[in-house]
Amino acid sequence: MKISPTGRLADDKLVVRGVSKTFTGRKSSVAALEGVDLHVDDGELVCLLGASGCGKSTLLSIIGGLEAPTDGEVRIDEELVIGPGADRGMVFQAYSLYPWLSVSENIEFGLKVARWPKAKRADRVQELLGIMSLTEFAKALPRELSGGMRQRVAIARALAPEPDVLLLDEPFGALDAQTKRSMQDFLLTVWRRTGTTILMVTHDVEEAIYLSQRVYVLAARPGRVAAEVGIPFGHDRGPNIKRDPRFLDLRDELSDLVTH
Amino acid sequence: MDGTVPDVTGTPVAATPAATGAGPAVAGAGAPTGTRGRRPSQLLGIRGPLALRWRIGFGALGVATIFAIWTYAAYALNTGSALVPTPAATWKALADLWSTGTLQSDLTASVQRVAIGYSISVVIGAVLGIAIGTFASIESFFEPQIGFLRYIPATALTPLFLLWLGIDESPKIWLIVVGTVFYNILMIADVARNVPRELLNASYTLGATRRTVVRRVILPHSLPGIVDVARINLAAAWLMLVVAELLAAQKGLAFEIIKAQRFRAVDTMFALLIVFGVIGLVSDVFLRWFRGRIAPWARA
């Protein structure tokens, strides 16, 4: 039995072992990822931090089962990932809501697919609408919502079928700074309330420190784990930690790692 | 026209001896008089908004222009034998066709042929188009056949169809099918290909099976596109109908035009052409309304 980088096995929710991905073109092939090892514990919030082009989105797609690794494996609760499934909810930067379905129908989609009974579906949708402060927009179509609200619907939709892991691919990348900050606080609240294991991809150093318990820094060409950094702030952190000297030190340290 | 030359009247530039030489610039400092920029054109603004009354006005002007040219042509070109009927003569011919009941039976026959033939074509187009746009294996299977068949002019098949299917309704209906189905298949395949990859991926991560993705994602997302394709290719269906009726028919709008030709009844021919135009207009408006009804989320 292999042992994950930190030597722990017991509460590993998600384990990525030696994952490589090579895109083979007509003339040359590009190594997008090479020998990536990482793990996320049960209930942990971890960020994958890296500059654009370092393969972090590819890695998330592989974990989500949307792409196959050239080499290596991904395991959730010890089980090998062979394709996409409802156990790994995903949220994309471009929201990707069903434009013909209302907010509550979008959230309900995964529950219908999983054949939840009708009453249970309605309860779950109501609960998520409440958590996401979307109750009054339950009947609205996605096109009638702002970017921040659409992303809340996308998160609610991914959370609805109670996934083991929530995978977020630069979910706040398309939002303005103001909305982005409130969505970050919002994500922390949701994480605290639901206890879901979250793996989030971002290129924003401050976002990574502000949200996560651990950060994996990815280096580019080929994409690989350059560093694993623990974040010393607790669960009930708030905007005030951004003035903490440790926050500033971490920001400098991680910024250096990302640009190198 | 307003002066578009940059005007500096109101600018309180520090008065240098040279500039203060002329009086008016200083005098105007208290009350600005110049304008900046070009005023947007009310009627010819590029992609500019146009008030509803102007829209209606221009539309009416367009119709009036056509009638004016038509009337002029009717009187100017008709030396000796009538080549162009006057609007009044056309209207009378139309009224005659209606009162004898010819128009009604022709209309029924033609509309029925197009409705049956084109419905078959759209259904085949939707099923095969979605399948081709969704599955690479099905696309590979049909690609060579469709690529070959689509370049055979459907009208060239008319004699064969008459030979195979006789001269009753079925060759006419199948000509309409064959003349439109390849356009429908290929264009609907494109519609299905345009479903965003991420929407499919999001569905898979919500636990959807391939069947669910086709039924609950690709199909609803393609629905307005299918209606658009059906609307665009409907013109080709009428084209095929005319070809079919010109060759062998006892009833129908195009058959009636041929009949009118034998009597040099240009007024009847014009009346029937107008009927074709009205049918096209009505079906276009209906399909646009229908698209908005079934897919309000995709309204422009």
Image (cartoon, coloured by chain):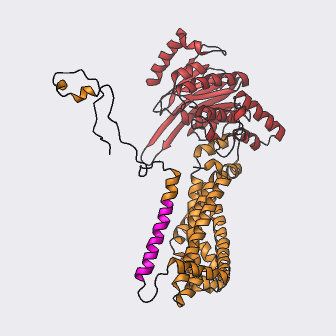
| Chain A, colour shown | red
Majority secondary structure of magenta residues: helix
- Quadrant of the rendered structure where residue A244 is? top right
Residue B98 spot, x, y in % from top left: 65, 80
| Relative height, residue B102 to residue A158 (above, below) | below
Q: Is A92 in the magenta?
A: no
Q: Nearer the viewer, residue A96 or B168?
A: B168
Q: Nearer the viewer, residue B189 or B172?
A: B172
In the figure, the shade used to draw chain B is orange
- Determine if the magenta segment contains residue B70: yes
Q: Is residue A1 visible?
A: no
- Seen from the viewer's position, the closer of residues A151 and A42 is A151
Q: Quadrant of the C terminus of chain A?
A: top left
Q: Give the magenta range.
A: B58-84
In the displayed structure, would residue A244 be above or below residue A31? above
Q: Which quarter of the image is occupied by the N terminus of chain A?
A: top right
Q: Position of residue B87 (x, y in %)?
A: 52, 77
Residue B182 on image: x %, y %: 57, 67
Q: Residue at x 15, y 24 (%)?
A: B18
